[in-house]
Image (tube, grey):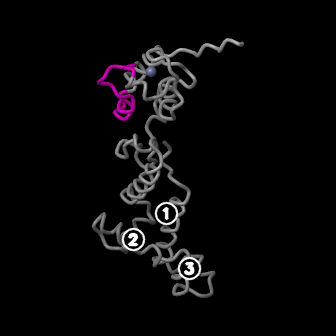
């Protein structure tokens, strides 16, 4: 939901920024303090050479030359930010179903968080976050099939009309209807009865 991505991918982006800075700016304070200058640094962790294929790929994606791309990286150009964010969010999507159900295009501009985090109405926001995090109806029983409730029951047990999809309603920002559908789901859940002690 946060769009932050994995720690190692954020470190990669930081490395990219440092590489661009080293390459473009000879007066960089870290370079000044280094006795052996650019030629040596090129072989170190933060080198342009190690990120060169990445720079090349970025320059092809936005149709500009590599020097210009490095300048855009350093000035936080929105196009570069979006490319990097998409990449890191897609990587999470390989492991997390949640990241996959939130379309990149629908995320908040520039922070890339799931827009449900900023829904104005607090009761709808809380409900939406619980749904996204899969903690709605925890330990409740689905009254249609009398089994422990899971998200899949919404469809399988027809808890809401066929043409409704709760994640799609959120993605389309149809929050009032989402809330109405969630109340409908909750009305079909019950608390488990305690087992009778023997
Ligand atoms: Zn069910």
Residue that label 2 marks:
55
- Check disc 2: other Cα within 10 Å, few if <14, some if 14-19, many if 20+: many
Mark 1 crowdedness (10 Å alpha carbons): few <14, some 14-19, many ≥20: some
User: Is 169 included in the stretch rendered in magenta?
Assistant: yes
For label 1, being within 8 Å of ligand 1 is answered no
* Residue at 40 percent of width and 41 percent of height: 102
User: How many marks can you see?
Assistant: 3
Disc nearer the start of the sequence (3/2): 3
Q: Which class describes the residues within 10 Å of circle 3: few (<14), some (14-19), or many (20+)?
A: few
Q: Secondary structure at mark 3?
A: loop
- Find the distance from the CA under tag 2 to the CA under tag 1: 11 Å
Q: Is mark 3 within 8 Å of ligand 1?
A: no
Residue 175 versus residue 154: which sits nearer the camera? 154
- Looking at the image, in which quadrant does ligand 1 appear? top left
Residue that appears at 72% across and 12% down: 198
- The secondary element bearing badge 2 is classed as helix
Which circle's residue, 2 or 1, is located before the other in the chain? 1
Q: Position of residue 62 (x, y in %)?
A: 30, 64
Question: Is residue 130 placed above or below 192 in the rendered structure?
Answer: below
Label 1 element class: helix
Q: Outermost residue, front direction? A: 198
Question: Residue drawn at (43%, 65%), measured in percent from left and top?
Answer: 73
**Residue 13 numbered tag:** 1
Q: What's the magenta region?
A: 157-174
Towards the viewer: 109 or 91: 91
Q: Is residue 57 above or below residue 77?
A: below
Tag shown at residue 170: none
| Label 1, label 3: how far apart the Cα atoms are | 16 Å
What type of secondary structure mainly makes up the magenta span?
A: loop
**Residue 183 place in picture, x, y as percent:** 45, 17
Q: Position of residue 88 (x, y in %)?
A: 45, 55
Q: Which mark is residue 44?
A: 3
């Amino acid at each position: 939901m946060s769009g932050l991505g994995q720690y190692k991918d954020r470190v990669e982006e930081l490395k990219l920024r440092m590489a661009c800075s080293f390459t473009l700016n000879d007066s960089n304070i870290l370079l000044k303090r280094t006795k052996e200058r650019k030629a040596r640094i090129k072989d170190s962790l933060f080198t342009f050479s190690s990120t060169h294929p990445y720079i090349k790929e970025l320059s092809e994606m936005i149709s500009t030359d590599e020097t210009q791309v490095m300048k855009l990286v350093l000035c936080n150009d929105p196009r570069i930010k979006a490319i990097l964010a998409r990449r890191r969010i897609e990587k999470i999507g390989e492991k997390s179903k949640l990241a996959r159900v939130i379309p990149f295009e629908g995320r908040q501009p520039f922070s890339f968080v799931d827009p449900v985090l900023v829904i104005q109405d607090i009761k709808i926001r809380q409900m939406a976050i619980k749904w996204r995090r899969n903690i709605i109806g925890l330990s409740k029983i689905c009254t249609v099939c009398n089994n422990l409730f899971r998200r899949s029951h919404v469809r399988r047990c027809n808890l809401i009309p066929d043409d409704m999809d709760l994640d799609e309603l959120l993605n389309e920002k149809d929050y009032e209807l989402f809330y109405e559908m969630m109340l409908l789901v909750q009305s079909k859940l019950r608390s488990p009865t305690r087992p009778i002690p023997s």
